[in-house]
Amino acid sequence: MDKTINQKAWFLVLPVFLVVAFSAILPLMTVVNYSMQDTFGNNQFFWNGVGWFKELLDPTTDLGERFFASLWRNLFFSAVILAIEVPLGIVVALSMPRDGWRVAACLVILALPLLIPWNVVGTIWQIFGRPDIGLLGYVLNNIGINYNYVSNEFDAWVTVIVMDVWHWTSLVALLCYAGLKSIPDAYYQAAQIDGASRWAVFTAIQLPKMNRVLLIAVLLRFMDSFMIYTEPFVVTGGGPGNSTTFVSIELVKIALGQFDLGKAAALSLVYNLIIIIVCWIFYTVMTNAGSERPASKGVA
Amino acid sequence: MHSIPGRRIILSLFLIFLLLPIYWLVNMSFKTNEEIVSTMTLWPHQPTFAHYMRIFTDESWYSGYVNSLKYVVINTVISISVALPAAYAFSRYRFLGDKHLFFWLLSNRMAPAAVYALPFFNLYSAINLFDTPWAVALAHCIFNVPLAVWILEGFVSGVPREIDETAFLDGYSFPRFFIKILVPLIASGIGVAAFFCFMFSWVELLLARTLTSVNAKPIAAVMTRTVSAAGMDWGLLAAAGVLTIIPGALVIWFVRNYIARGFALGRV
């Protein structure tokens, strides 16, 4: 569909622009301001140039070491949960009942974890995993697996990952389900006439149709896992040690815990920059996928 | 829709996996603290409503829910009302910088809340909105407005533009066309967008907690009070948790037929 060029459309966009600019650009300017200065308290600030950035990007300093450690940890976490949630979400979407009340019931249950406040998600898993009062921790310990997410790094990681899978796989599943629903029956009939195997139906019809929604799912899941804060903070508090301290947790520690404004601001800007770059890559891929959409292959 | 072998088993297992931790929370909220700590029981043997009674009668507890709902509602109303015209503009027109603007909005949806916590604190303190629902509502706009624009743009694009043209030929002014014709046509889209604004504002804690101290404290922050000198009040914590799930569950029920399409942001 061709859009008409109309500069007056800016008036329609103006409210959004003002609201978001107020919450995004103004605070970001303060961050930029802080990132260039040092303070010894008393609201006295000194020009520090790019000093904080140099320290942040140099892994030999304390700040740099902490930043890179949390960054790799976070990227590893994002990779693991994407590798679990995307295939699992597709499988769940493919397993959805055809119609009737069961669909509605499944959709409601699937959506339920998505609407639980993030700290409550943390609380739920904190309780569920405890060896003394939680079902999961109790059962695991009773069948001979020594499980304790408070003191064991590996257990803490497993808990945080399982929690995220519990929390967000539904999002992937619901997106895929929406994609599958949009496939006309004629495609399947054509596949049946051609004698296509189950696998062929999946790769030639269902997967291409889910392309766009899968991209949205991967984008949202990557972004949200990359800025995860509340859930692991409630469950493990970033520990044991620093083993589950992700970038946001590290940032809040520096900003609100130590009140190191300069360091926190420099970290914020680099963090934001990474996110904008990744976001831009996805956005480009997504808009390109959109323009090629009519040519996408299908059996029918 | 073609499905896969063993789908019932897979789906049942997954749904049980989703429900089990929630069941455990509900289960604990009906137990006495002695029962929680001393024995492992699969259902409450001495069911009690004491934890719920305490939340409903203690103002410092239930005001947390009221505060949370206040900023969620304000945020949803602001987000939808500014996003509607913008969604129409993005869907129908090309204008200077439209793609850049759209991307900029999208990038704000992805911005980590942790980055904004401190500057928001300074900003809202400076304009005397700190510790009011308005501060949290405005702060949540940073991710909800872009999301609402994104969803609504998908739904507006689903309305054939012949409808716009016919309406304008019939002499409808733009505002009248917008309210009388467009809004009813995308009513389900508005519902979905409102659902998402509600959802993301309701589940967010970091900003909500940073921007409030006493008067506008959200329930999520009140919940941290269950840690006391006498140890953890697990039953109370569980009951408070269960009560935060209920608004979400209610909202899901209303939009259940649109959930799937909504999660695809109106773009299937």
Image: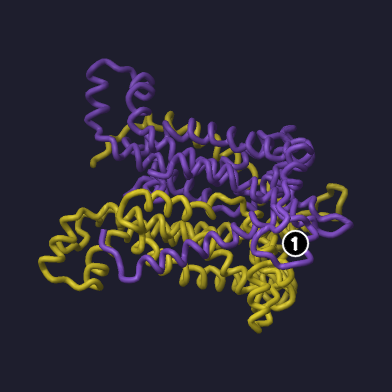
Chain colours: A yellow, B purple
Q: Give whichever of A136, B43 is nearer the camera.
A: B43
Amino acid type, callout 1 = Ile
Judged from this view, the residue extending furthest toward the left is: A193
**Is residue A300 in view from this perspective?**
yes
Q: Looking at the picture, how far across and down is residue A178, in whole percent?
A: 34, 53
- Which image quadrant: the N terminus of chain B? bottom left
- Which residue ends up furthest to the front in the rendered image? B45
- Extreme top residue here? B171
A13 w.r.t. A202: above or below: above
Q: Looking at this view, is A30 or B66 the one in front?
A: B66
The residue positioned 63% from the left and 81% from the top of the image is A143
> Where does residue A28 sit, x and y in percent of width and height?
63, 48
A254 and A189: which is toward the camera: A189
Rendered image quadrant of residue A25: top right
* Residue A231 visible within the image: no
- Residue A260's place in the image compared with B69, above or below, is below
Taking A211 as reference, is A264 left or right?
A: right
**Residue A128, how many percent across, how many down?**
65, 65
Q: Is residue A294 above or below residue B79?
A: below
Per the image, the residue denoted by label 1 is: B36
Count of picture labels = 1
Q: Nearer the viewer, residue B6 or B131?
A: B6
Percent from the top left, x then y, of residue A63?
Answer: 72, 69
The chain letter for the residue carrying disc 1 is: B
Is residue A70 depicted above or below A263 in this figure? below
Disc 1 residue crowd, few under 14, some 14–19, many 20+, Cα 10 Å: many
Q: Tell me which corner region of the image, top left, top right, bottom left or bottom right, holds residue A134.
A: bottom right
Q: Quadrant of residue B97?
A: top left
Residue shown at 63%/60% (left/top)?
A: B24
Residue at 55 percent across and 73 percent down: it is A76
B241 left or right of A172 in image: right
Circle 1 SS class: helix
